[in-house]
Image (spheres, coloured by chain):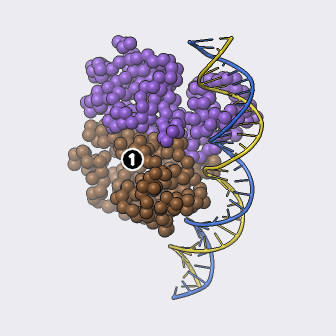
Chain colours: A brown, B purple, C yellow, D blue
DNA sequence: CGGAGGATTGATCAGGGTCAATGAAGGTGG
DNA sequence: CCACCTTCATTGACCCTGATCAATCCTCCG
């Protein structure tokens, strides 16, 4: 299972400034593993033994309370998740499961904390990553509180379009049930929202979205750089 | 206006491990100022020139979109706000205004970043603070998505009670209009929620809350440590 | 004393959730 | 290779939480 050369990991912003010896040390206890779809990786409340990095595939972060469950985020390659828990040596606040077949790198949390206190560049990279994740969470909270479900769907489509290269057509990152939960609505309502957005010139075919009238969609969605821009 | 000895700032976790010379350097360009209530401190979108620290009083963080506005957080002494924007040298994602008469320390962001790259202990303190803020934001997102408004109010009351020393009676941290927005509901609905929670043995007199039947309230609210505990 | 803003209450409305039925798609085993 | 089963997506009907609108009252201040 374990693979020797996590070359993609080395390329991450998080590790780019680290010198080779330090990186080798950090990777000594790390391993890369392949998982099939729909596999539970971690459960909320468990101790944070490993920093996880999605190398390929995709992972859903989700949380539950009182028999309810909600999607919190989709993690796509190449990025880390549960960095904050690793840093604080605190239990996970979210569970994680694979969506698709995925390659995941696991780095022992204590090694990350050790590297952090030795390597100043790495420390800065960690803070930067954490600050970015914090800001992206602020943006999604703003979206959740300031927009209704139709507006959230419309703006989500525009953001996905940008991420996938700004072409007119692109794929949704997950099934519609998960997407609905991510956007804070039910699958039934997402279905109706898509239908209703056809008036703004969007077309849905399974997970393939095509935006026929960009201007019309944006006129309705009113995207804002302090909510929707990837990284400000 | 500027005051010479920001002694409370020195006591913050963020600066406790810092040596005196380094701290003095960081404070050279800093100043402490008194503000009356309802004063705008910063506006979202502006460059993050200063790290802010609430020394006394209280501050509301809020955001707007398309003529709507929502409260994002109440910052109470002694703690920092907009740390992530300072670290990333990015524009503020939230606006801030004083609620009560407040003393605020302002430290130039570039000095914070400079101290960060020189002082390893400080770097670790920053990451720790940021990780904590991130986790607390995750918790409030979970609350927003997993609980209905009555449940949010009930759990909010339990949390406030803990923060204020776990006695039966305590004060709300702000007026009810702001509180409603913070909890993602309207003032009218908050009013009705309070009334409805009287069945669980709570009493409201202005901003004074008294919990007469702790067990009954908790049976309804079902607080959970991965959402409601202050710092796990 | 008067005015402005917050709080409360009631009446009404709509956004969005729930329930149920049906259809489409993909995986499994005979 | 196909029948079957499970899961997801869609659609319709209905309901409920919570928003909106409006009127009143209260409190704090100038």
For residue A78, which quarter of the picture? Answer: bottom left
The quadrant of the picture occupied by the C terminus of chain A is top left
Q: Circle 1 — which element?
A: loop
In percent of the image, x 57 and y 46: which residue is there? B145
- Position of residue B22 measured from the top left corner of the image (x, y, whole percent): 28, 22
**Along the line of sight, the residue nearer the viewer: A201 or A90:** A201
In percent of the image, x 45 and y 41: which residue is there? A138
- Position of residue B98 measured from the top left corner of the image (x, y, whole percent): 49, 24
User: As drawn, is A127 to the left or to the right of B138?
Assistant: left
- Report if residue A119 is visible in the image: no
- How crowded pointer 1 is (Cα within 10 Å; few <14, some 14-19, many 20+) is rated as few
- Position of residue A140 measured from the top left corner of the image (x, y, whole percent): 47, 45
In percent of the image, x 55 and y 44: which residue is there? B142
- Report if residue B104 is visible in the image: yes
Chain of the residue on which disc 1 is drawn: A
Q: For the image shown, how many numbered marks are present on the structure?
A: 1
Residue B213 vs A14, above or below: the answer is above
Q: Which residue is mark 1?
A: A229
The quadrant of the picture occupied by the N terminus of chain A is bottom left
Residue B61 vs A210, above or below: the answer is above
In percent of the image, x 67 and y 35: which residue is there? B188
- Position of residue B130 measured from the top left corner of the image (x, y, whole percent): 41, 36
For residue B18, which quarter of the picture? Answer: top left
**Along the line of sight, the residue nearer the viewer: B11 or C17:** C17
User: As drawn, is A107 to the left or to the right of A153?
Assistant: left
């Amino acid at each position: 299972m374990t693979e020797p050369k996590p070359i993609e990991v080395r390329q991450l912003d998080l590790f780019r400034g680290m010198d080779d010896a330090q990186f080798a040390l950090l990777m000594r206890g790390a391993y890369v593993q392949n998982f099939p779809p729909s596999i539970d990786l971690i459960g909320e409340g468990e101790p944070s033994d490993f920093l996880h990095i999605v190398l390929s595939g995709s992972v859903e972060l989700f949380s539950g309370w009182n028999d309810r469950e909600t999607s919190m985020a989709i993690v796509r390659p190449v990025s880390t998740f549960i960095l904050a828990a690793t840093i604080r040596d605190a239990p996970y606040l979210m569970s994680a499961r694979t969506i698709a077949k995925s390659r995941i790198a696991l780095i022992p949390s204590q090694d990350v904390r050790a590297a952090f206190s030795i390597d100043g560049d790495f420390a800065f990279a960690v803070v930067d990553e954490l600050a970015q994740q914090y800001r992206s969470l602020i943006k999604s909270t703003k979206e959740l509180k300031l927009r209704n479900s139709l507006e959230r769907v419309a703006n989500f489509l525009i953001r996905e379009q940008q991420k996938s290269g700004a072409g007119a057509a692109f794929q949704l990152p997950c099934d519609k049930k998960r997407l609905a939960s991510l956007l804070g609505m039910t699958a039934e309502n997402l279905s109706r929202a898509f239908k209703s957005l056809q008036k703004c010139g969007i077309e849905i075919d399974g997970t393939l979205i095509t935006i026929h009238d960009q201007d019309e969609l944006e006129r309705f969605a009113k995207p804002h750089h302090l909510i929707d821009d990837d990284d400000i």
